[in-house]
Amino acid sequence: MRAVENALGVKIPNNARILRNIIEGIQYVQDHVIHFYHLHALDWVDVVSALSADPKGTSDLAQSISDWPKSSADYFKGIQDKLAAFVNTGQLGPFANAYWGHSAYKLPPEANLMAVAHYLEALDWQRDVIRAHALLGSKNPHLQTYLVGGMASPIDPTSQAAINADTIAQLKGMFTRAKEFVDKVYLPDVLAVAPFYLDWAGIGGGLGNYLSYGDFPQADGSPWLPQGYILGKDLSKVHPVDHQQIAEYITHSWYESDDDSASKHPWDGETKPKYSGPKPPYEFLDTDKKYTWMKAPRLADHPMEVGPLARMLVAYASGHPRVKEVVGAVLKTLGAGPEVLFSTLGRTAARCIETVVTAEKLNEWVDELAASMKSGDLSIHDWNVWDPEKWPADVKGWGYTEAPRGSLGHWIHIKDKKIFNYQAVVPSTWNCSPRDAKGQMGAYESALLGTPIADPKMPLEVLRTIHSFDPCMACGVHLLNLEGNEINEVTLQSAHGFSGPLLRFNGRNGGS
């Protein structure tokens, strides 16, 4: 949307801006909590150890760090019994292949039991708070109410079929519950777990280059989370982002090009799959050649890390008042300086910090929407955008957002009212980037250098660092037949006369 809006010079109504901020904001909060408890916590929490915990000790621990009401010894005993019953079934599902008992686990059993309890609580919590997407976007994921030019969600205080006072009240209730869980469960858990793993404040730092496009536009057009990039861990200078300096290499990627050593700006980019990796039985990749479906995006020829850590570092270095305050409080609790943020532990802490500050903003945005409605402004869309006769014959645009995983950019070239070319550079493409023509590594590869591994057959330490980025491998999945040919493509055909490839089953045209 933003790419087309940029190309056509569209300014969306104020209510559409607010609605997009609300939808994106609760996505951050829900997504980050899910990531910590359900996708990353088990890299640090030994679930089996929780079976030997003293529920009274767990209760004492929980009550020492928070006044969250679910903290009695009886409550934790019930969780422990539920866990034991689950283990005794022998049907462990996704937990069957975990590295339980690994020497790298350091939490005492009582802390592990507390984390398991909160893992289960987070399942119900996230289902509740993300109902905001159903109210404002019809469904989650893949919301249905975004439109070029604004939003499709009607606003009418007198209609039950539109966003009204009841909707405002429901949103404020959800967001109050969201903030309470973040403040009383998620943040205290991170601060309780981190001291046992302070050695990870010196592991997994990687590139030291951080990019944020900035997002959550305010009424004056400036982003609430600032835009910029940092080089070499230097927090004294935030460089401005020029998207014209973004280009992608395919030197080590399974694509074809006239010159594999040259990079291309996304407006000129191509996505032509050409698999040249190992054939069955798929033994080893030759990383001196092509070895991945991910391209290698670069900003001013620098590899970049994107995501919550990048956003919080750019905000911190830019002087964002609330981010600096929360970062300072977390660092004070840990007894450490800002340098610990350049690490696997810092990446995990930054995601929590971002969740805290975003959860605080949600009801502010709802109040902003309510005030706009009260003023009589009910506009949500600029319908003039859908008059192709007013479109330029040849125009380019770029749109950006900060998805939960990081910087997401889309570039579009519209020619004769049709999509001539469309390329996307998604967060996991930045982070999972292979080496480029100059041999520069991407964020994952760089972050893994020097990682201590206690048992090569159980590389828990590798998972800790990779999971700290919240990778999305679906962004790099390509569906090919044995001859290396693309299998399917979904084509967009509009009533207004433009057409073009909207989705190829190769992961490049999607978001994150």
Image (spheres, rainbow, N blue to C red):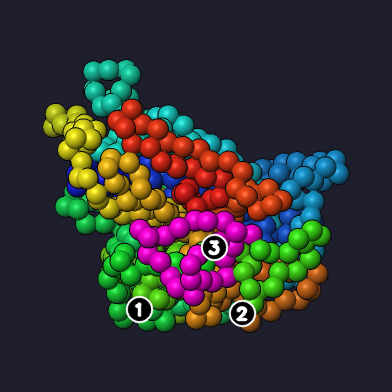
The residue lying toward the viewer, choosing from 274 and 86, is 274
Q: Which residue is mark 3?
A: 256
* Structural distance between the alpha carbons of marks 1 and 2: 23 Å
Residue at the farthest front position = 258
Do tag 2 and tag 3 residues touch (Cβ < 8 Å)? no
Q: Which mark is residue 449?
A: 2
Q: Report helix, strand or loop for mark 3.
A: loop
Type of the residue with mark 1: Leu
Where 342 falls versus 117 (above or below)? below
Camera-near label (2 vs 3) is: 3
Q: Which residues are magenta?
A: 251-275
Q: Is residue 483 left or right of residue 227?
A: right
- Can residue 169 be seen from the camera position used here? no
**Quadrant in which residue 46 is drawn:** bottom right
Which of marks 3 and 2 precedes in the sequence? 3
Amino acid on which the number 3 mark rests in the picture: Glu
**SS assignment for the magenta stretch, majority:** loop
